[in-house]
Image: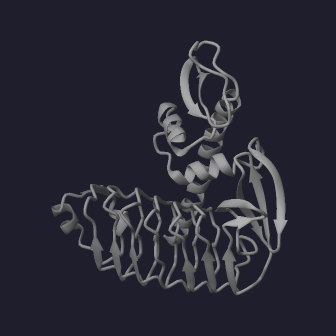
Amino acid sequence: MTSDLTTQHKQKGAIKMKKNITIFLILTMIFLTSCAPNVNDKTTTESTTTDITTVNFQKENVIISNNFTWDDYLFIAEKYSHPDITLCDYFSTYYFGTEDNQNFLVSEGENGDFKYRLFENKKVFITEYSGDSSTVTIPSVIDGHEVIGVTCRFDKSEFLPNISLKEVTVDDGIQYIGEACFENCMMLEKVSLPQSLLCIDNGAFHGCKALSKIALPQRLNCIDDSAFFECGELKQITIPDSVEYLGSYAFFSCSELECVKLSANVNQLHGSTFYNCSMLSSFEAQNLKQAFEADFHNTKIDIDSLVENGTEIK
């Protein structure tokens, strides 16, 4: 059963990649047209890097900012049939893009053990780590540029786990921890996250088997699918009320997890969230409206009590 679910987890990652590529193409079209005023709108003035610009897209006027923001992204996502977009999707598509399409990429650089990519908005994503230290600090400024996210893998490959890294500090200012960033860092015991952090993406701490506790910052908005998959030593977790999305498989098979306090702004679970958390006995949720039986499979949570408190179980 576990191997089947792990396969499903990888399939979901592939589906997410296809969705991200589609969204990125939409963003690219809009970005390229945003540099010029809309000839069909007489009120549009010549744009600058800070102006609001009206562009014509699919025969409709779409108002966006040249400094593309999350609100712009969400507007496009909802308008063009992508209602399930999360803040993690925003970072992974607009900033990081795809290997085949780097329209927003300006240059690449290297500083010490880190390689990075510089984008048109003067923000940096750290994309590679080459060191083997047991303690790592991820900087929020590199070569004078603001680091907004970390997308590198700290393991050597999908099949070669990192057995040296034990402690990570993410400097304040960083907003995004990317997909599979610390996956298979099997000896990682301590992680210090900044209050600036907004997103923990798909599988970011997957397989961090020595991680026993982690404090989630109060601005965190999104914990994506499989973020803490098989963190076998994690004993309790408080998900702050700033979190609006908690992905499927997020705490799958955290076998020592005993206590969960759910964000008041998470009103649904998406499947297998706490699957096989066999020690989970305390679950506090204020506004959980919908969940699946698989979310609590092989836990000590009383499903009937959730139903009595207004949660629909599918």
Residue in the image at 58% along x and 12% along y:
42
In this picture, residue 254 sits left or right of residue 285: right
Q: How is the model colour-coded?
A: one colour
Res. 272 image quadrant: bottom left
In this picture, residue 309 sits left or right of residue 260: left
Vertical relation: 176 (above or below) 300: above
Residue in the image at 50% along x and 46% along y:
85
Residue in the image at 38% along x and 80% along y:
278
Q: x%, y% of residue 314?
A: 30, 55
Vertical relation: 258 (above or below) 99: below
Res. 123 image quadrant: bottom right
**Residue situated in front as seen by the camera: 295 or 129:** 129
**Residue situated in front as seen by the camera: 205 or 48:** 48
Vertical relation: 219 (above or below) 65: below
Task: Tally the numbered discs.
Answer: 0
Q: x%, y% of residue 36?
A: 69, 24
